[in-house]
Structures are given as structure tokens and as C-alpha cells.
Image: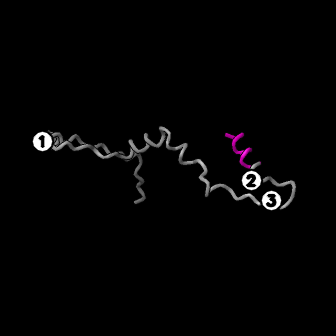
Amino acid sequence: MSRKKHNIAYIKPEEPKFIRELKAQMGFKESPDVNTKRQELSEGEEEDYFEDRGEEKPQVVVLSKEHLTAQEADEFQKKKI
């Protein structure tokens, strides 16, 4: 009863010829699928996604002389990159 299914895969069947012809006549373009979305993300959007935006930067609180100021934190961040 505890049969586990492993290695399940889906193979998309080829479209019938008449459907391909109808799509060609209408100028239908395939919408992006999961694989194309992964490719787009890996081509450079990932860097933009992980950059800190102004409102998402850490808040700087200076309680003593030993703590970093906002300018020092920005300089450190620039050196890090």
C-alpha cells in the first residue's frame, strides 16, 4: 500500500498538424513555460532581484563611537561589491 512513485516525468505530445496550421494562420505565439522563465531569471534578473533597495537597506543606529555611521556602512557595502 505504500508504493512510492519516483521519477515521474511528463512528455508533452506533439500537436496535431491542423492545430499547428491554425496557430500559424492566426499568428499565435506560445506563452513562456516554466523552463523559459528559469532561463530568463538566470540571464541577469537574478542580480537585480537581490540588490538592496533604498527602503530595504538596514537601518543604522549609532549608540556609541564604536558603531558604524550611515556613510561608513555605505562605504563598506561598496567595498564588498
Q: Nearer the viewer, residue 10 or 63?
A: 63
Residue 26 shown in magenta: no
Name the front one of labels 1 and 2: 2
- The numbered mark, 1 or 3, whose residue comes first in the sequence reads 1
Q: Nearer the viewer, residue 42 or 53?
A: 53
Q: Nearer the viewer, residue 68 or 71?
A: 71
Residue 74 shown in magenta: yes
Quadrant of the image for the C terminus?
top right
Outermost residue toward the left? Answer: 18
Give the residues in magenta: 72-81
Count neighbours of disc 3 (C-alpha within 10 A) and say few if under 14, some if 14 to 19, many if 20 or more.
few
Tell me where residue 53 appears, x and y as whole percent. 59, 52
Tell me where residue 44 appears, x and y as whole percent. 50, 39
Distance, label 3 to label 2, CA atoms, is 9 Å
Amino acid type, mark 1: Phe
Q: Residue at x 43, y 41 (%)?
A: 40
Instruction: Give the residue pinned by disc 3.
Output: 62
56 sits to left or right of 2: right
Q: Residue at x 43, y 43 (%)?
A: 38
Outermost residue toward the right? Answer: 65
Tell me where residue 9 appears, x and y as whole percent. 35, 45
Instruction: Give the residue pinned by disc 2.
Output: 70
Query: Secondary structure under badge 3?
Result: loop
Mark 1 touches mark 3? (CB < 8 Å): no
39 sits to left or right of 58: left
- The numbered mark, 3 or 2, whose residue comes first in the sequence reads 3
60 sits to left or right of 28: right
Instruction: Give the residue pinned by disc 1.
Output: 18
The correct choice, above or below, for 71 with respect to 40 in the image is below
